[in-house]
Amino acid sequence: MRYAFGFVVIALFFLDAHAQFAPGYLPAYLPANSQISMTLCDAAASSTAYPHYFHLAFSMHAGETRDYSPKPPVFGGGVVDGDTPNLAAGTQCQPVTISTSGVTSTSTSSVITSSCYDYTSTGGGRACSSALGLYTFRTPVAPSVTKAPASVGVSFSGPTTVAETITLNPNFATLTIAPSCTQQNGAVITVQPHSAGSNITGDAGTAQFDVTTNIGTPVPGQAPSGNCIFSVPASSNGANVSLPVIGSVYQPSLAIISPTLPINHPGSTTITTKVSPSFGGVQIDQSCSVSGGTTITPMTANKLTSSSGQAAFTINVQNLAVVNPNTSVTPTASCTFTVHSGTGTAIASFSTGNACAYGLQPAPPGCGNP
């Protein structure tokens, strides 16, 4: 986690537990009796021509131990315990590791961090600024966890990204929040840090993620949905928070986009259907019915839609027209297409007829005497 601060060096002394703090600082907690990694940053160091370092001012109780790294190669000459090594002029940040042991649940032991500069090359001394932050070591790690927003949605129109903020109370810093998600009915959920290191809690005890929802292959009649759990590592109470991911029921309409209906020719015909909203992998079922002597031979009973939401069926139809002296007898032929498990339906109809009812002269054989 980057703790970035910009401030002016205003004092020529090392800080103790009663030091002045830089504006905007927020007291926070660190897990006790463990090893902690953080990155301390001073943005002002980028424009200063002197070596820069950080100072860690520990306040510990009897029976407690603490340590840190990196340490300077030599103490003395103004270099004291709690200093980190000098960084090259213009360097803003320094990763540090802090470890503690023997801290009890009632302890108030702490560490104050500050940014310092080394002016000894020009005859000056070593000076530290107002404090960057105050951290109290706390055990056990048992925060409550909240989230904002309370839930995220799934859209059928494309990927949607929502910034999700996870907050710990009390505000433990340096903890890496771990997300994991389940998904169902076609929902696709990905979680990434909102920015570099934003999955690690800062002094406010917050971490921020981008939750992106999308749909792969939806299930008609069902809502794409899921659940994301954000867990706190090293937590003694299994602290986590659940983020529901909620979509609307996928209930697509179905249309026949070719050929023009009704179909008025016998033989082989390809009928193309399309679901809306369009998604691939949606099953379309076909059933055909005939009467009066017409025959239909479908090539397949069902198909899955393409990425454009289309499914094409080839059928063979014969005897659209019959010869029957009873002119009230007319064959029928149609094919019904339905979205599997859904309500979308489309019907392909065929033009049929009775040649004896056409008034042809002479009448076709089989129509009987006029």
Image (cartoon, grey):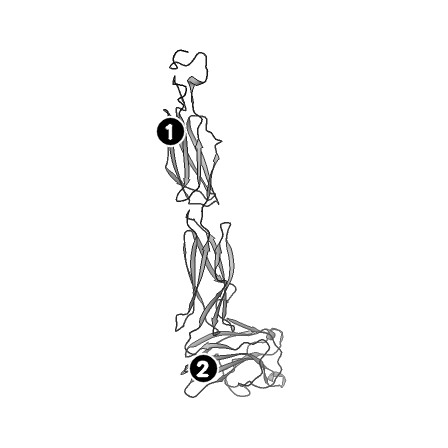
Instruction: Specify which label sits upstream in the sequence, 2 or 1.
Output: 2
Depth check, front residue: 30 or 106: 106
Q: Is residue 91 visible?
A: no
Residue 324 in percent (x, y) is at: 38, 18
| Rendered position, 159 above or below 349 | below
- For label 1, the crowd category at 10 Å Cα-Cα, with few meaning under 14, some 14 to 19 and many 20 or more, is some
Using the image, tell me which numbered label, if any, was put on residue 105. Answer: none
Position of the C terminus by quadrant? top left
The quarter holding residue 52 reads bottom right
Using the image, tell me which numbered label, if any, was put on residue 67. Answer: 2
Tag 2: amino acid: Asp
Residue 364 in percent (x, y) is at: 41, 14
The quarter holding residue 338 reads top left
SS at mark 1 in the image:
strand
- For label 2, the crowd category at 10 Å Cα-Cα, with few meaning under 14, some 14 to 19 and many 20 or more, is some
Depth check, front residue: 123 or 47: 47
Tag 1: amino acid: Val
Q: Is residue 121 visible?
A: yes
Residue 363 in percent (x, y) is at: 43, 13
Using the image, tell me which numbered label, if any, was put on residue 290. Answer: 1
Tag 2 near tag 1, CB within 8 Å: no
Left/right of residue 6 with respect to residue 294 in the rendered view: right
Q: Residue at x 42, y 57 (%)?
A: 226
Q: Nearer the viewer, mark 2 or mark 1?
A: 1
| Rendered position, 236 above or below 245 | below
Residue 143 in percent (x, y) is at: 44, 73
| Rendered position, 130 above or below 189 | below
Q: How many marks?
A: 2
SS at mark 2 in the image:
strand
Q: Residue at x 63, y 84 (%)?
A: 122
Distance of label 2 from label 1 (alpha carbons): 87 Å
